[in-house]
Amino acid sequence: MTPLKERIAKNGHVLNFYLTIPSPFLAEIVAHAGYDAVTLDMQHGLIGYDAALSILTALATVDVVPMVRTPALDPALVMKLLDTGVLGITCANVDDAQQAAALVRACRYPPVGDRSFGPVRAALLHDDYVARESDLLTVFAMIESAAGLANVDSIAAIPGIDGIYIGPYDLAMSMGLPPGPGGTFDPRVDAAVEHILQRTLAAGLIAGMLAPDGKRAAQLVQRGFQFVTISNDVRAMQATLAGWLEDFAAA
Amino acid sequence: MTPLKERIAKNGHVLNFYLTIPSPFLAEIVAHAGYDAVTLDMQHGLIGYDAALSILTALATVDVVPMVRTPALDPALVMKLLDTGVLGITCANVDDAQQAAALVRACRYPPVGDRSFGPVRAALLHDDYVARESDLLTVFAMIESAAGLANVDSIAAIPGIDGIYIGPYDLAMSMGLPPGPGGTFDPRVDAAVEHILQRTLAAGLIAGMLAPDGKRAAQLVQRGFQFVTISNDVRAMQATLAGWLEDFAAA
Amino acid sequence: MTPLKERIAKNGHVLNFYLTIPSPFLAEIVAHAGYDAVTLDMQHGLIGYDAALSILTALATVDVVPMVRTPALDPALVMKLLDTGVLGITCANVDDAQQAAALVRACRYPPVGDRSFGPVRAALLHDDYVARESDLLTVFAMIESAAGLANVDSIAAIPGIDGIYIGPYDLAMSMGLPPGPGGTFDPRVDAAVEHILQRTLAAGLIAGMLAPDGKRAAQLVQRGFQFVTISNDVRAMQATLAGWLEDFAAA
Amino acid sequence: MTPLKERIAKNGHVLNFYLTIPSPFLAEIVAHAGYDAVTLDMQHGLIGYDAALSILTALATVDVVPMVRTPALDPALVMKLLDTGVLGITCANVDDAQQAAALVRACRYPPVGDRSFGPVRAALLHDDYVARESDLLTVFAMIESAAGLANVDSIAAIPGIDGIYIGPYDLAMSMGLPPGPGGTFDPRVDAAVEHILQRTLAAGLIAGMLAPDGKRAAQLVQRGFQFVTISNDVRAMQATLAGWLEDFAAA
Amino acid sequence: MTPLKERIAKNGHVLNFYLTIPSPFLAEIVAHAGYDAVTLDMQHGLIGYDAALSILTALATVDVVPMVRTPALDPALVMKLLDTGVLGITCANVDDAQQAAALVRACRYPPVGDRSFGPVRAALLHDDYVARESDLLTVFAMIESAAGLANVDSIAAIPGIDGIYIGPYDLAMSMGLPPGPGGTFDPRVDAAVEHILQRTLAAGLIAGMLAPDGKRAAQLVQRGFQFVTISNDVRAMQATLAGWLEDFAAA
Amino acid sequence: MTPLKERIAKNGHVLNFYLTIPSPFLAEIVAHAGYDAVTLDMQHGLIGYDAALSILTALATVDVVPMVRTPALDPALVMKLLDTGVLGITCANVDDAQQAAALVRACRYPPVGDRSFGPVRAALLHDDYVARESDLLTVFAMIESAAGLANVDSIAAIPGIDGIYIGPYDLAMSMGLPPGPGGTFDPRVDAAVEHILQRTLAAGLIAGMLAPDGKRAAQLVQRGFQFVTISNDVRAMQATLAGWLEDFAAA
């Protein structure tokens, strides 16, 4: 397994994909598709812990980075996922430096953090897991609120935070704009995204965000993002399903 | 799917049923039985998130309102359940207005609340889900402690709380009475229930409570309750199982 | 675990219950209800092998006889179920002595039969399982066709067949009557049932049949049946669900 | 639920989709996509009975015809699937009239067939299920061998067979051509397909076949096919996954 | 089911085993092996709630105490596990008396604690469950930090805490030593363990700790521990797997 | 993935391990332990198809040969397992050349066999799967009856049979000896085993058998067996569990 930070160091950027459907075989298909990382979305996706385990097993069949987006800063859940072999954590809604520090503490063993010892599956999969943990693991704080936007520099300054992942949908709502695409594509949101991106890069961290398709993913990379998620499984499936019906109707 | 509030507006009351057994097919049988709502009891029931998903799928086969009782005021869990398509939340043990307000924040998008955006399955099932969310969703705060009893008016005054659901078993213990039916059927508990009922109705909210069978459910409706749960799956199953054995022995 | 044959020897009859819902906790509730045997209906029920295993685990928590109705005379499936710890087999649709003999061969080790050796879970649960297998296990051939009716004596004469279980629904259709209750309660079916019952008793075997409720189960026992199934989980659940709604409406 | 035959009568053709991934939520997404029927591929797909049940539950949330392709002419499995609520059977590899007749016997109650009585979930979902079974259910015999090709007329003549589904991959191999696309697109295979199509239409039955995408599905309909499957879930997922990577690389 | 405290009163000590693999049949094998208690490790093990339920079902087949180690002081999870029938709670990382008191409150009904009423499965399995709850249940606070070490006396003084379970791995890291065996077997850790052991015994509570094998488990008992865990399922499995390969290579 | 035949060509022998517990994580632990092949025992093990899929996913995380022992010569099941990515089939109870030929037909595409085309997961995991299928796949016929013993030469002569796997337990019973170790270790059985071994080697095929531990596995290799199974998961687990209790008692 090539860790995420090593991939970025080599290629300048990586592509990620979101899973929201709890299906090991679907995860295996995604894992073989050529993306660098696959993130289980445990926030908005339909994946609880027991399902996550079966999906992580499927991802381990390929050299792809297994990541999780956690719905909250829940140290017990973060530690349990790390013990299960997750190598990337994207924590939703980190609003300030204190929360960022708490996130790092949950991810790292003492003296950096206070992760409890017991890497049951992680150590099975990776030789020298404990010694190599900081290289293997990548930690993203999501900035997706006006508060997080205001605190981007202090969040990015926390040692152990490897990257900032921007959530433009929640950020837009937090800025008083309506939910959904309407508010999210407002120029004020784009300006905020650009600000977070530049401060993240200035801090020497990885900047990440979601793109709805491959073309716009490339635009994000050109703009400076090194960690780009191309949509998710539901939208990927619906894209082909709808396309085939359109082609059928048009023929 | 006819939302709960629309059903109550039309019929004056609705009947609910509790699921505690994690079984999609059992849920499908219940969904076809003619109750208005089916609530997954994630507090005392044997249902975790991954099982809940399979049960919610089964409930979606019929026009019945899918609800969940959450074991605590856990915004991450509440949001995740809403994204999965749950249309009613009964939150255990709301003791004061602050907790009631936190419950509403978890359930509603900004500017009313701070729910995160990503209604993966909810939007698949319901056209215009985001626009219609406040109509589709019903939020109950459970009052089941002496503190909640004292704060009933301020809890009921929180905008976004649609109803108060009374938990007489915990309320009785909180009032110093013994656990189980012994304490719960004490007249002091009944007086407290009546007080909560009247204050809830005075606030223009829905009043809800559990009845052990159909006859007593009718009594609750006659008393003013609009949302009445008739027992649960374990007791329904045991009632017939025991009845058949008695009939066998008596024959 | 008290075997079925020992229970019949002691009490003259036993009560059985059919599971069609694949739910371990529901099975556990049924197991505690006081029936002697619980049969997983793998013919019409919604239970495949992997679900059956989880249900059999739940049944092992109580002293109740775990049985399976198999959808066909499939020796591989029968042997696998026995290795999993099933202690009663009801094989659907046994039409003649050859099929009855094949059923026994699947159930018994050489020299009586040709069951393959490997009682993985059965031996975990029962000391001396291999030596006691013929005492622990009860084998029912279902007679539910005109052919089976004609061959009842030769079927009952096969050593190793412990009982005859009558299937009046299929028997009725096989006799040219319409499917469902209409045909099944025709007097010609009842006469055929009586004939099978008497020939079974004459052969010294256990006679079994389904009753829709406890009262009619008692009538079957009075008529001579020693193994009586009282309905199933779906009907038990629906009975209470409908009864509560009726009581609610009548109140 | 609008049955398949009723849909064809109304629109002249229907679109079907194959599921091979055992995932209820994926099935739910597919069910909402606008296809008329969704077929669980229990032959080449990764779906056993217990998984099939969970998928059929998901399909019941939408007005779409739930079908199964069975890996063999296995009456016990066919009957069990029908009891679970499946409304279309596509039986792999029917080589002659005898097999076609056996398929019909497994699907229909006496006097037409010898299906056993016990429609546990089918009757829950459909009022008057037993009376309406022949309207609700559609039975396809797959012709996918040189023998089947030779016997197309006698297979199509069996009362109760509603349609012929052509399997060009196996047919090609059976005709001595290499496995995979190479042999399958040989003109000799196409001629055989055309022959089966014409004989099926001449017999007044539904002709069905797989198309790799929407455009070619339209061509099959123009050619006379009334039941056209547009690929499957694995290929749909891979199409978008690969397309996004290509768009990314090209940008 | 003989409760843990009754076993210790009778034999002076009990043996426990950790499950980290989510497998009901594996749990059943362990339950039959002769240990007094089996603890589901929900902290480092790969077991979420839905999996835990299936394992608890398997443990109920034998007279063995079903316990859970919870990853955090999460009252909602603790109460839900107790309702599911868990009879022992080992709560990770209890640092002071306040946390110990909160743990007890989650485990006991009023007036001792504030556990919510609804012992769905617990009452199914145990007659008089509510009345006997304090006898049936055993509560361990884990001390595994420098803070917990400093507060051992005040933690042990909380009524309702039945025992102290020492976590030497985390304790070592908390004392500034490196993670893993290296730090854990440092003499300073051993001195801290001895201190906690003596204070626990002085308080009249049960002292518990993990041993890597049977021989060292005996040493812990000789040292005064009454509750000793002998390793876990992963290590048990790996021990034999590696031993057989070594024996093969050596032969 | 290094195929079994390539491993034997290189090392002279391979070690196999039987899984009977349906647990993906247990399978992953076994896969990392250093054995060449892991066989899912679908005959006596507690593994149905849906569970098998999850285990095969876990095995794909390591370079180990995933195999299945099938309970019978069931072409539909064999083909489905191969499509799922199984690379070794051990078919129970092959009694004569006709059965051996039927087994090969189920495993190979035309013109060698009549396997149906659709390697859904196998082709995902292996480039050029169809072209390389005969190299990737290993087919064992089990000889475990007096009939099979008599027909060893004609069975071994069937092209496509790669090896003979001896089942001494069933063979002993078939020879009139009692079930279990008593009969199996009779010298007459050993003589029969030796005969099958020598005829298998004379035919240039792989000879396989079970050993109860590593030492006796080495003896089998010295005797000429190239494919040796060292016991199974239940016995491996029980060995350590019992050993630790013995060490505890002895200390």
Image (tube, coloured by chain):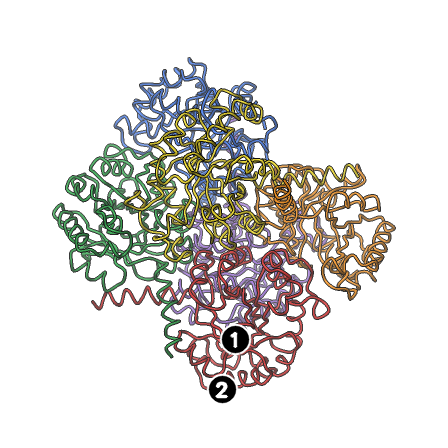
Chain colours: A blue, B green, C red, D purple, E yellow, F orange
Secondary structure category for the residue under label 1: helix
| Residue F83 coordinates in the image, percent (x, y) | 63, 48
The disc numbered 1 marks a residue on which chain?
C
Q: Is residue D229 left or right of residue B42?
A: right
In the rendered view, tell whether residue A157 sits above or below residue A133: above
Asked whether residue D232 appears in the rendered view, the answer is yes
Residue F124 visible at all: no
Total marks drawn?
Answer: 2
> Any mark on residue F36, and which?
none
In the image, farthest residue toward the front: E202
Q: Residue B137 at what x, y percent from top left?
A: 27, 45
Please state which of residues A95 and A105 is positioned toward the viewer in this rendering.
A105
Note whether C198 is above or below E118 in the view shown.
Answer: below
Taking the spot 27% from the left edge, 52% from the top edge, the residue there is B2
Which residue is tagged 2?
C191
Give the mark toward the camera: 2 or 1: 1
Q: Position of residue E184 (x, y in %)?
A: 54, 26
Q: Looking at the image, which residue is at 83% across and 60% down?
A: F188
Callout 1 amino acid = Lys
List the residue tagged with mark 1: C10
Q: Is residue E28 above or below residue C245?
A: above
- Please give left or right for residue C73 compared with residue D137 in the image: right
- Within-10-Å neighbours for mark 1: few <14, some 14–19, many 20+: few
Is B47 left, or right, of F36 in this rendering?
left
Q: How far across and how far down the image is residue A91, in percent?
A: 41, 29
Quadrant assignment, res F78: bottom right
Secondary element at tag 2: helix
Q: Nearer the viewer, residue E95 or C8?
A: E95
Q: In this view of the protein, which residue sits in the foreground, F4 or B212?
A: B212
Do the residues bearing badges 2 and 1 touch, measured as CB atoms within 8 Å?
no
Quadrant where the N terminus of chain D lies? bottom left
Question: Of the residues shown, which amino acid type is indicated by label 2?
Answer: Ala
